[in-house]
Amino acid sequence: MAGLAPIAFIAITIGLTAVAQETERDPDFSDRPVRTGPIKQAKDPSGPRRHFRLKNPALLTGEDAERLYTELKSDMATRYGLSGQPGVVNYQTWKRYNRVPYPSVSHGNRYLSNYGNPAAAAYGRFEQAGRLPVGSILAKDSITVSKNGQAMPGALFLMEKMESGFNYVSGDWRYTMIMPDGSLFGTTNGEGTERVRFCISCHLAVEQQDHLFFIPEEYRQN
């Protein structure tokens, strides 16, 4: 697409020298794909057990995390939109439920931001949200920041509440993961469904709250 810089060279740093995005293996990353063709994974490409993990993440203040995210987010949304998945093009116009990007070990030591479409408005009640209605979409984008200060776009994670019977085990949530270059990593009951099966397994831990995890309290905004 015209106007987009090559994905290999999107990097922002915190007072350090930038290096190219991970076109080859980066020693700061564990189980990262080699970006030289179709997505590959170091261990089992057909069924990963967790998110790709940054081994040595930077520890950022909320202010620094927000500054880096602000620099990257417009280009991130454009690239995610190349996937053609529903809700991706305009997700950053939805309600954002965190004040600044927050660190998440379970998402591979990335810094995350959570958005919800109007149908998912009850998510803003957090633990009192109850069951979200059909049509609710939650979008969680991410950035990675390694210990040398390199900040790069991460994957986009989507949860969409489908009609009853879509998938009993997932609570009828469809999980979708889109890579930073806009390629589809996997979607429940669709292309690459086995690659996002671990999302279902993880969220089963909170089955009693509609399979929803919530933002740490210190980062929340209504």
Image: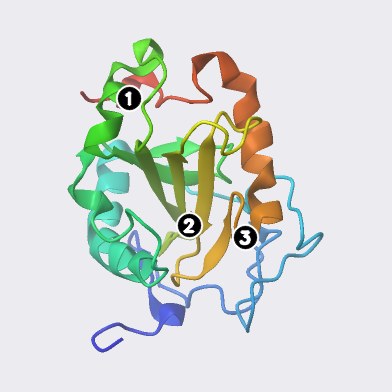
> Between marks 1 and 3, how big is the CA–CA gap?
34 Å
- Determine which residue is flagged by label 3: 28
Q: Residue at x 49, y 47 (%)?
A: 110
Q: Nearer the viewer, residue 70 or 36?
A: 36
Amino acid type at image mark 3: Asp
Q: Quadrant of residue 200?
A: top right
Disc 1 residue type (three-letter): Tyr
- Element carrying mark 1: helix
Q: Secondary structure at mark 3?
A: loop
Q: Residue at x 46, y 41 (%)?
A: 159
Residue ID for mark 1: 123
Q: x%, y% of residue 211?
A: 53, 25
Going by the image, does 160 lie left or right of 205?
A: left
Of labels 1 and 3, earlier in sequence is: 3
View extreme (top): residue: 128
Kindly identify which numbered label has been placed on residue 35.
none
Quarter holding residue 206: top right
Quarter of the N terminus within the rendering: bottom left
Proximity of marks 2 and 1: CB atoms separated by less than 8 Å: no
Where residue 164 sits in the image (x, y, percent)? Answer: 51, 31
